[in-house]
Amino acid sequence: MQAGILAAAGIISRIIGLLYRGPLHNVIGALGWGYYGSAYNYYTIILLISSYSIPSAISKVIAQKLAVKEYRNAHRIFICALGYVLVVGGVASIFLYFGAGLFVKGASITVLRTFAPTIFIYGILGVLRGYFQAHRSMVQTSISQILEQIANAVVSVGAAYLLINITMGSLELPTDEAELVKRATYGAVGSALGTGAGVLVALLFMAGVYFLNRRMIYKRVKRDPHTELDSYQTILKMITMVVTPYIISTAVYNLSSAVNNSVYLKAFLEARQLDEMELSSRWGIFVGQAQTISNIPIAFATAMGAAMIPTVAQTIAAGELEGTREKIATAVKMIMLISIPCAVGLFVLARPVTGLLFHNTRVEEDLATNLLMALSLSVVFYALSTLSNNILQGLGRVNVPIINAGIALVIQTVVGVLLVGYTDLDLYAIAIANTIYSGILCVLNQFAVFRELGYRQEILTTFLVPTFASVLMGAVAWAVYEGILMLTYSPKISVVIAIMLAACVYCVLLLLFRGVTEEELRGFPKGHLLVRAAKKCRLMK
């Protein structure tokens, strides 16, 4: 249920993020997205190393203390974690600002420097989110994510619009190349300011929630009967020992985008001696449109994984091995029930979905459509590997995901370099390498979980039934879209109706084929209403 709450918030946040991409793309253009995407990849790496893993790591450590009711030690960990991120986040922000030229070049340097303060703010936000997640309460984090994305959307579009208007005098595209680069740079800087504004709003909300609950927190700490207190030195050492593997694991896991960026914008540029602006524009379509859309379904897996870390940590600490297996099996099934139909839907409706969200030229639309189709399979792989990555961390096997991600990254890099250098696949080579990376990581992580816990995932209703139902759903979605398009001549109306009908068809097929039980359906948010509706429609006994 908590994973469902966090997943719903994650999906809402991704949808908000997706909806504002269209207006923002109209303001900053594909070149602006290219500069923003290049800077964002390296900002993400520094964020991963310094602050991004904090919520997961802190939630695990505090959850272990809460499992044995050591409330005073749990709160001391929280205080020590705040001190940790203030130091680490501050150093990382300064390094990113002054060392931006080490990662990117040209216009992207200014954009990357704009991201620097966000790293410091995110660290504090991460500790607060991890604290509440450790209590197995995802509502606070969920609301903060939605507020973060709303503020991000408003400020990104607004700041980009104002900066371009102030510096260029209007939104008109200049004909001079230098002026075009200048316009794209300021647009990308505005987008980066939006990212920082979103994190700041989320931090203010989480700080307010903590302030409102402080009396209850301190009362529980005061009543804690445990007399043995961990020293701050011991806690800091424990945090460092736990956070460091999380950092390495998460950083390696997410290095894929940065490597792809380097392979395409550096290796491809040097090998083919092509125009840098043209490549940056095409890269902007890849990261700003195709990859952004494909990442939406993965939000559910990310949320489920975040919820699983404290859950697994607590059940393992309590010695409930069988309960751990059951929770993991249920989580994997829920992930597949959602990610498989999403992957099929994105493949079948790639063109109308892209057209619904972005205003492109015909050439840009063709490229975005084909890239989204090429990335659709990776949705399933990334969803499962994201979940299994967090499960392994919850089990304390933090080194395993590092090794697996490293193996997958090496193979992806080799494949990417070979395809980019010796074929004419262009950006499709990056899409193929990305899918190979996620597939290898998925298999390695899942095998590690199986080996660690000695359980086997049920195959029929977890993989086969959702796949069969999704294929039928995809056929219906395509037929409905084409049929309504012939009647209305409106791709946007047609795709919206097709998506809604496809979702209904998939749910009906899933119930008819007994792909989900009543107990599992009740596990979804508002599951009792879903069960009641299914029984009224005679889809469930």
Image: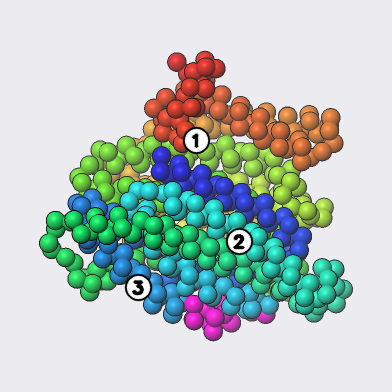
| Residue under label 3 | 84
**CA–CA distance in space, label 2 to label 1:** 30 Å
Q: Give x and y (percent) for residue 219.
A: 25, 57
Disc on res. 152: 2
The quadrant in which the C terminus is found is top left
Main secondary structure type of the part rendered in magenta: helix
The reply to whether callout 2 and callout 3 are in contact (CB within 8 Å) is no
* Residue under the point 74% across and 52% down: 358
* Residue under the point 56% across and 68% down: 196
The reply to whether callout 2 and callout 1 are in contact (CB within 8 Å) is no
Select label 3 or label 1 by which is in front: 3
Mark 1: few/some/many CA within 10 Å (<14, 14-19, 20+)? many
Furthest-left residue in view? 227
Circle 3: element type: helix
Circle 2: element type: helix
Q: Give x and y (percent) for residue 251.
A: 45, 65
| Residue under label 1 | 337
* Residue under the point 73% across and 38% down: 495
Residue closer to the observer: 203 or 90: 203
Label 2 sits on what residue type?
A: Asn
Residue closer to the observer: 75 or 396: 75
Closer to the chain start, of discs 3 and 1, is 3
